Amino acid sequence: MRAIREMTINDYEQMIELWSGIQGLALSDADSKENINMYLVRNKGLSYVFEHNNEIVGTILCGHDGRRGFIYHVAVSPAFRKQKIGNSLVQTSLDKLSKESIHKCHIFVIEDNSVGNHFWTSMGWEKRSGFYVYSKNTK
């Protein structure tokens, strides 16, 4: 059986295993179980998993700040790629954002992640230019 369903913190172990095996997907302290749980609570109903025979083979983390949506960790197990799973996960989250009156969404893709950059370009997303992303740890 194959299905998309809302992500819960109970999915964490399977998700982290999937994410750890995806080339180009960077994990950090922000991906701890506690932090992912806070993210899911704050952004209820926007993040999803794709299951095949009770195994998570695809994920999308999605949230918003009240004006723009943000997508993180779109991942599909290499064995399940080219089946439109990523497309379905993205569209599900975008539809949910739209229902919350969020009409623009961003994703950060690591520059040398050729698979990820190809995926987003093929889905019609525009690569932005003209600004830099700055980051700073708060502790």
Image (spheres, rainbow, N blue to C red):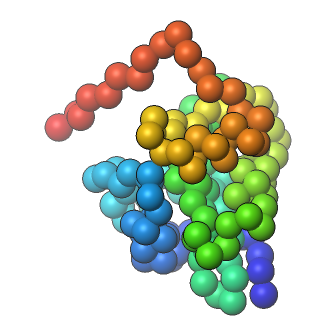
Q: Is residue 59 above or below residue 139?
A: below
Depicted 12 relative to depicted 43: above or below: below
Quadrant of the rendered image containing residue 48: bottom right
Front one among 90 and 115: 115
What x and y, as percent, mark residue 125?
71, 33
Q: Residue furthest top?
A: 130
- Left or right of 56 in this view: 19: left
Residue 2: tell me if it is visible: yes
The residue at 74%/42% (across/down) is 122
* Residue 12 appears left or right of 33: right
Vertical side of 56 occupied by 63: above or below: above
Of residues 134 and 122, which is closer to you in this image? 122
Quadrant housing the C terminus = top left
Q: In the rendered view, does 132 fall on the left or right side of 44?
A: left
Residue found 61% across the figure and 65% down from its top: 76
Q: Quadrant of the N terminus?
A: bottom right
Q: Which x, y percent locates residue 62? A: 60, 48
Residue ID at (77%, 35%): 124
Q: Can you give x and y, in whole percent of width and height, for residue 27 in the image? A: 36, 54
Number of numbered callouts drawn:
0
State whether residue 64 appears in this view: no
Q: Quadrant of residue 75?
A: bottom right
- Residue at 68% x, 67% y is 81
